[in-house]
Image (tube, rainbow, N blue to C red):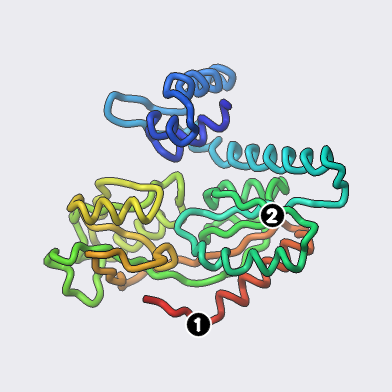
């Protein structure tokens, strides 16, 4: 419970939302985090009456927490199979970062299931940095995430290069633009993903604004593109996401590509140094599917 509480609060940056996500009371989640902090001998979060943020210790330990939970789930799945008398079934944990192309994964998993009927496939939401840790310890078998600088001990292949796009209310003065640059969004209140969920994407976006000599002003973060779109529709600000995260055109909003240096990001498929046959097959299915023409909007 302690690790689950830590990860939920780290991703939500709100104890109430973390408690709702875990279907627990907020005092239970707060107590679990405090117990973990006591065990570790350091604070995982900065807490004020207005906001919650990760400490340096919390930031450093979050990928390990994700990897440990993935290993635990794989252990539980393996245990259930053995208890049921099935000693041949194996498990493939497939991790995917937020904002990656879920439709691509959904197209490929049924094909993998048909080719490997004796393998239990366990999808797992996980940030890219946590996937790298989990792959190195073989807690997961395959990951889909965003390109990052350190992929030592992991095999990486680019699935697609995705453009950053702005979500703009149809009535906004910028709604008539065919493209937008960082300088045109300078000082504008932006909504995007939390750094702890997609640090690679955040760093790429920061670079785009820095290269464009623009001021990046993030006023709110949300852990799903649907939440970002809702805040944009409510008039909170302009949303920033990637094309792959949009499975439909949000009603009442314009989707406008960003142009300029560093306004694209590579979506990658990740394997451990010695992948299983099942993981390798899924990687190949994903690469093949990503090369097929997209219907788009």
- Give the residue at x 38% y 27%: 46
Q: Residues within 10 Å of mark 1 (few under 14, many from 20)?
A: few
Residue 37 point in image, percent of width and height: 52, 21
Q: Name the element at disc 1.
A: loop
Which is more toward the observer, 207 or 64? 64
Q: Name the element at disc 2.
A: strand
Q: CA distance from mark 1 to mark 2?
A: 27 Å
Foreground disc of the pair 1, 2:
2
Residue 124 point in image, percent of width and height: 59, 49
Residue 34 point in image, percent of width and height: 49, 19
Residue 296 point in image, percent of width and height: 41, 77
Q: Are marks 1 and 2 in contact (CB under 8 Å)?
A: no
Task: Tell me, for residue 199, which label it has, or none.
Answer: none
Residue 168: quadrant of the picture: bottom left
Which is more toward the observer, 228 or 183? 228
- In the image, residue 234 sits, relative to residue 8, either above or below, namely below
Residue 113: quadrant of the picture: bottom right
- Give the residue at x 49% y 18%: 31
Direction from residue 86 to residue 196 in the image, left or right: left
Which is more toward the observer, 30 or 25? 25
Task: Pick the quarter of the image with the N terminus.
Answer: top right
- Give the residue at x 51% y 62%: 102
- In the image, residue 21 sits, relative to residue 203, either above or below, namely above
- In the image, residue 260 sits, relative to residue 293, either above or below, namely above
Give the residue at mark 1.
293
- Mark 1 or 2, nearer chain start: 2
Q: Residues within 10 Å of mark 2 (few under 14, many from 20)?
A: many
Direction from residue 217 to residue 153 in the image, left or right: right
Give the residue at mark 2.
121
Residue 282: quadrant of the picture: bottom right
| Identity of the residue furthest to the bottom in this view | 293
């Amino acid at each position: 419970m302690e690790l689950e509480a830590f990860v939920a609060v780290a991703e939500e940056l709100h104890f109430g939302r973390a408690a709702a996500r875990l279907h627990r009371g907020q005092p239970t989640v707060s107590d679990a985090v405090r117990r973990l902090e006591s065990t570790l001998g350091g604070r995982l979060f900065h807490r004020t009456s207005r906001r919650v943020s990760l400490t340096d210790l919390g930031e450093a330990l979050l990928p390990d927490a994700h990897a440990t939970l993935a290993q635990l789930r794989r252990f539980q799945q393996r245990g259930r199979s053995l208890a049921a008398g099935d000693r041949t079934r194996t498990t493939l944990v497939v991790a995917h970062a937020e904002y990656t192309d879920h439709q691509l994964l959904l197209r490929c998993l049924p094909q993998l299931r048909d080719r490997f009927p004796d393998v239990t496939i366990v999808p797992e939401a996980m940030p890219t940095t946590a996937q790298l840790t989990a792959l190195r310890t073989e807690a997961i078998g395959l990951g889909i995430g965003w390109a990052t600088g350190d992929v030592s001990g992991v095999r990486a292949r680019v699935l697609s290069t995705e453009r950053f796009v702005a979500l703009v209310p149809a009535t906004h003065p910028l709604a008539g633009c065919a493209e937008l640059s960082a300088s045109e969004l300078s000082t504008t209140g932006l909504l995007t993903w939390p750094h702890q969920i997609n640090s690679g994407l955040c760093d790429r976006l920061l670079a785009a604004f820095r290269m464009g000599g623009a001021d990046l002003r993030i006023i709110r973060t949300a852990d799903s593109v649907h939440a970002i779109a809702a805040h944009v529709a409510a008039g909170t600000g302009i949303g920033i996401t990637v094309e792959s995260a949009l499975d439909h055109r949000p009603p009442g909003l314009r989707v406008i590509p960003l142009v300029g240096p560093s306004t694209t990001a590579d979506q990658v498929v990740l394997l451990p140094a010695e992948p299983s046959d099942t993981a390798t097959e899924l990687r190949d299915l994903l690469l093949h599917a990503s090369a097929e023409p997209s219907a788009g909007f």
